[in-house]
Image (cartoon, rainbow, N blue to C red):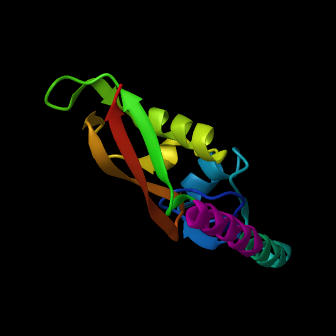
C-alpha cells in the first residue's frame, strides 16, 4: 500500500487534499501519471492541509450561492405551454432542458439541466415538481405549471 495525496476530487476514492492508502500499482500507473495524486511525504502533508482548507472555503461559497438560488426559485412558479390533446396529454414531453430554459427566461437564473431531476419527462398538463440539486447539501423543489397552447 502507498499513501497518496489527492489533487482533485475522485468519485469513490476521496476529495482534493485527502491523504489515502491505495495499491502501489494504482498509484504508480494511474493516479500519479495523470496528475490526480502525488506521493505523500512530509511536504505533501502540509500541502494537503492547504488543499483541504481551500476546498472547504470553496465548498462553503458554493453552498451559500446554491442556498441563495433556492430562496429565489422555491416561491416562484415556472410556467410552460405546450401543445396538448383533449384529455390534457401533451404531444411530446417536457424535459429538464425545457425546464432549465424556462427558468432562465422567466427568472434570469441559469440552471444546468443535469442538476434538475425528473423521474420521467412531463407528459401531462398541470402542476409538477422538479427537484433541483445544486450542491450536495442543497436540494429543493421547483414548481412547474404546464398549460395547453
Instruction: Work out whether 71 lies above or below 10.
Output: below
Residue that sits furthest to the right in the current view: 43
* Residue 16 horizontal/vertical position (percent): 68, 64
- Left or right of 33? Residue 133 is left
Q: Nearer the viewer, residue 109 or 132?
A: 109
Q: Is residue 1 visible?
A: no
Which residue: 78% across, 74% down?
41
* Residue shown at 64% from the left, 48% from the top: 109
Q: Residue 98: image x %, image y %?
A: 46, 33
Rendered-image quadrant of the N terminus:
bottom right
Which sits in the foreground, 49 or 117? 117
The image quarter in which residue 121 lies = top left
Q: In what quadrant of the picture does the C terminus appear? A: top left
Q: Is residue 65 above or below residue 145?
A: below
Is residue 51 highlighted in magenta? no
Give the magenta range: 56-72
Who's the residue at 62% across and 61% down the image?
A: 69
Instruction: Give yes or no for residue 67 being in the magenta stretch.
Output: yes
Give 38 or 70, whichever is nearer the viewer.
70
Which residue occupies 19% across, 32% down? 88
| Residue 149 vertical placement versus 132 (above, below) | above
Which residue reaches farthest left? 87
- The picture places residue 73, in percent across and down from the top left corner, at 55, 58
- Rendered location of residue 85, percent (x, y): 19, 22
Amino acid at each position: 500500500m502507498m499513501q497518496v495525496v489527492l489533487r482533485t476530487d475522485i468519485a469513490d476514492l476521496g476529495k482534493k487534499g485527502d491523504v489515502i492508502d491505495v495499491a502501489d500499482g494504482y498509484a504508480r500507473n494511474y493516479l500519479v501519471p495523470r496528475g490526480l495524486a502525488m506521493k505523500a511525504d512530509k511536504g505533501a502533508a502540509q500541502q494537503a492541509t492547504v488543499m483541504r482548507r481551500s476546498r472547504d472555503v470553496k465548498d462553503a461559497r458554493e453552498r451559500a450561492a446554491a442556498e441563495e438560488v433556492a430562496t429565489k426559485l422555491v416561491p416562484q412558479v415556472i410556467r410552460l405551454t405546450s401543445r396538448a390533446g383533449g384529455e390534457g396529454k401533451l404531444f411530446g414531453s417536457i424535459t429538464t432542458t425545457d425546464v432549465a430554459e424556462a427558468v432562465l427566461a422567466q427568472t434570469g437564473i441559469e440552471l444546468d439541466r443535469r442538476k434538475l431531476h425528473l423521474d420521467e419527462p412531463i407528459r401531462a398538463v398541470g402542476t409538477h415538481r422538479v427537484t433541483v440539486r445544486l450542491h450536495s447539501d442543497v436540494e429543493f423543489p421547483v414548481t412547474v405549471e404546464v398549460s395547453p397552447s
